[in-house]
Image (tube, rainbow, N blue to C red):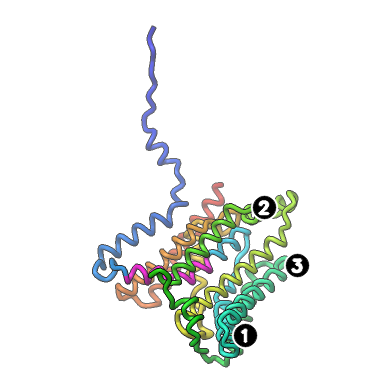
Amino acid sequence: MTITTHVKTGTAIDVLRHIDWRQYVVYIGFVVVFAYFAITQAGNFLNTTTLVNIITQAAPITVMAVGAVFVLSVGEIDLSIGSTVALASLGSAVTLQATHQWWLAALAGLAIGAGVGAVNGIFITLVRLPSFLVTLATMGLVAGLAQQATNLQSVPVTNSAFGWLFGGGTLLGIPILIWWTVAIVAIGWHVLRQRSFGAHVLAVGNKSSAAAVSGIRVNRVKMIVFIVSGMAAALAGLLYAGRLAGATYTLGSSDLMSVLAAVIVGGTSLTGGKGSIIGALVGSLFMSMINYGLLLGGLNVAQQLIVRGIIILAAVSLSLRAKKNS
């Protein structure tokens, strides 16, 4: 009796061939760019101060990116987050000057963010306007309110408790901004991956009509998502105000591109139904590292914008191709 054994060849190659490397692009890109800056600018880049600065500077972007993951995952977009950063930070700074109570100032800022998100949600869910147009309009409206409210003047933040909690403090030797990053990412991941609301968000993003038939209250999910996005932008404004010891109407004005780049590069689908909180975290650190590395390399702000634009184009192309193939 002869026993024939069939040995499969090329198994490892076949496995690698069938892996969708697009979902790992942010992690691969992070490692490659980190290695590049570590080699070309080792003296200035590979030190504790630089690495901590990269993480802390990415904190507001990461907070907004977590909110943006929910918005994009539900199949919508929020262009008003940058303007909300400015208005919320100014509102909290003015409240702090009037009351000298850090918690009232924080609540005022978060309430402004929730209000902007609610306005977006109402026009999108009840009036049934496209989120792109609604948030484009509120982006200009909120930016105008931020400029009008303080007559283009900055508002200082001198309260030590506010400054410590929202940017300038350390806890157990670790900057408070890193603690905020860890907390928001952990909450966002838990809600998106472990709670029913996260499953509802992804279901609505995949196909809202099917989600409605299955009993999911689509409008309610979208309303909550936009409120969350507005509050995330407001919290980012508080972190800016605390770290910079002041608020101005220009805060957050250039953050929209960084947030979208971080989220899309991180694996969240531009057309809904797929989101990654961890990917958004890595994406925000990736963008912060690029900005910091380009500054160390002598590149100016305009050149940084060019690089971010290229990254967004590449990320959107991969996202749309992945959606089409699926």
The mark that comes first in sequence, 2 or 1, is: 1
Residue 265 as seen in the image, left or right of residue 234: left
Disc ID at residue 271: none
Q: CA distance from mark 3 to mark 1?
A: 24 Å
Check whether the beta carbons of the residues at disc 3 and disc 1 lie within 8 A of each other. Answer: no
Q: Nearer the viewer, mark 2 or mark 1?
A: 1
**Helix, strand or loop status at disc 1:** helix
Tell me what residue is drawn at x 67 percent, y 65 percent.
224
Specify the quadrant of the image occupied by residue 51: bottom left
Q: Is residue 79 rendered magenta in the image? A: no
User: Which residue occupies the extreme front position in the image?
Assistant: 172
Q: Position of residue 88 (x, y in %)?
A: 58, 80
Disc ID at residue 145: 1
Disc ID at residue 207: 2
**Helix, strand or loop status at disc 3:** loop
The mark that comes first in sequence, 3 or 1, is: 3
Residue 151 as seen in the image, left or right of residue 305: right
Residue where numbered disc 3 is placed: 126
From what the image shows, is residue 43 above or below residue 21? below
Query: Which quarter of the rendering shows the N terminus?
Result: top left
Q: Mainly helix, strand or loop, the magenta region?
A: helix
Q: Position of residue 146 (x, y in %)?
A: 59, 85
Q: CA distance from mark 2 to mark 3?
A: 18 Å
From what the image shows, is residue 43 above or below residue 279? below
Could you tell me if residue 306 is visible in this image? no
Specify the quadrant of the image occupied by residue 27: bottom left
**Helix, strand or loop status at disc 2:** loop
The three-letter amino acid code for the residue at tag 2 is Lys
Region in magenta: 49-65
The three-letter amino acid code for the residue at tag 3 is Leu
